[in-house]
Image (cartoon, helix red, strand yellow):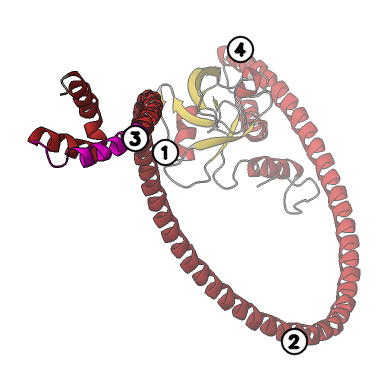
Amino acid sequence: ASLNPHRSCPTMSGGQQLHHSMTSLNTGGNSFTGESHQGLAGIGLLMQQDGGPNTKVFIKNVVPGGACGRDGVVQVGDYVVGVNSNNVIGLPVAEIRERIVGPIGSQIRVSFERPSGEVYERTLTRGNAVAADDPYHSMSRSIGGEGQRLSTSASAIPSATDGDVMRLRGRVHELESELTICRDELGRARNLIDSDRDNSARYVRELDVVHRKHQEQTTELRNMLNQSEQARRELEIHNQSLESKAQVVQESFHRAKEQTEAREQYFADLKRKFEDVQSNFEKEVAVERDGKAELQRQLQNAEVAMQRQKAEMDQFKEQERTRREKEEGVRKLLHESESKLAAAREMEEKVSAASKQLHLLFGQWQKDFFVNKSREEAELEQYFLDDSPRFLPQADGGGRGRQGGGP
């Protein structure tokens, strides 16, 4: 509940209206300021519990001039987690309020938790001369209660003794002091009301501005809606032409799809043929590689054989050189033999000529001594009649013997 300065209640007096308005500040929802009855005060907090039971109570507002406001550490949004070292997490707002409220001027230790998780503890003094917790509620109750006590004290003065008079005068001074405090609180409440009124007026002006902007935006949106409707009609016309074009494009797409499928089939056949050719080529390459390896081995064997043949050729050349040297020697010997043979032939011709002459002589001699021919003479005749060269040396020897031992 909040205070509306522009609203009045015709059935209440001014003081009743102010008391009703100030009391209504602290009775909305689950929010409390932590003040109970006259003589007790809280620490100037407006607490609230939005998540239901068993949830943390958070600080909705910090009352200016209260204990927390003077401390300056407690912030809106912090959680109340402990009172006098007692855990209050999960407790309802009313129970936490009862634990916080206490005699005015007494101290209390309250633990708070930041939204970030930081936990801290503050030692606070309940109420003071400025304002204990909620100035609206405490001021309204102080005004009503003190007015009633003043009237009661005034009616009791005639029958009171001197001691009672002195006590009553002291009480009056106390009440006057409290009345001064209440007046100050009332002044602050009026200031707050004026501030609330100004804020309300500002809020009304802002709402008017927002309303005007809303109307302008509504008009603009309507214009945009009309333009969108016109554009929709144009798009429908354009869409019809596009549908016809889309049908033509779809037919072309089907034809292109059929051609693409045919191309894919053709490419698949080509790929299969290529794989077959590649497989055959790889086999041929493998065979060629094996053949090449075999040729390499044969070439190595041929090189080994060639080296062996080269060694044999070198040996053969050495033998040939030796043979040629021997052949040259044989040729020399043959040439010498031919020279000797030529000389022997010349000698044979000479011997043949001499033999013919001797043959003629022996023929003549044979005629002369044919009758008295002895065995020696017959052998000599046979010797001279034989033309074989093997008998030439014998003929020479025999001749020489013949000549040496002739008759």
Q: Can residue 267 be found in the magenta stretch?
A: no
Residue under the image location 67 percent in, 16 percent down:
173
Residue 4 left/right relative to 346: right
Q: Can residue 361 be found in the magenta stretch?
A: yes
Of residues 150 and 320, the one drawn nearer to the viewer in this rendering: 320
Disc sitting over residue 166 in the figure: 4
Residue under the image location 15 percent in, 20 percent down:
405
Question: Which residue does the numbered mark 1 point to in the structure image?
Answer: 90
| Badge 2 or badge 4: first in the primary sequence | 4
Q: Amino acid at mark 2?
A: Gln
| Alpha carbon separation for disc pair 3 and 2 | 146 Å
Whether residue 386 is visible, yes or no, is no
Of residues 405 and 176, the one drawn nearer to the viewer in this rendering: 405
Is disc 1 placed on a helix, strand or loop?
Answer: loop
Where is residue 28 shown, x and y percent of the image? 60, 47
| Badge 3 or badge 2: first in the primary sequence | 2
Magenta-highlighted residues: 352-374
Q: Nearer the viewer, mark 3 or mark 1?
A: 3
Whether residue 112 is visible, yes or no, is yes
Q: Residues within 10 Å of mark 1 (few under 14, many from 20)?
A: some
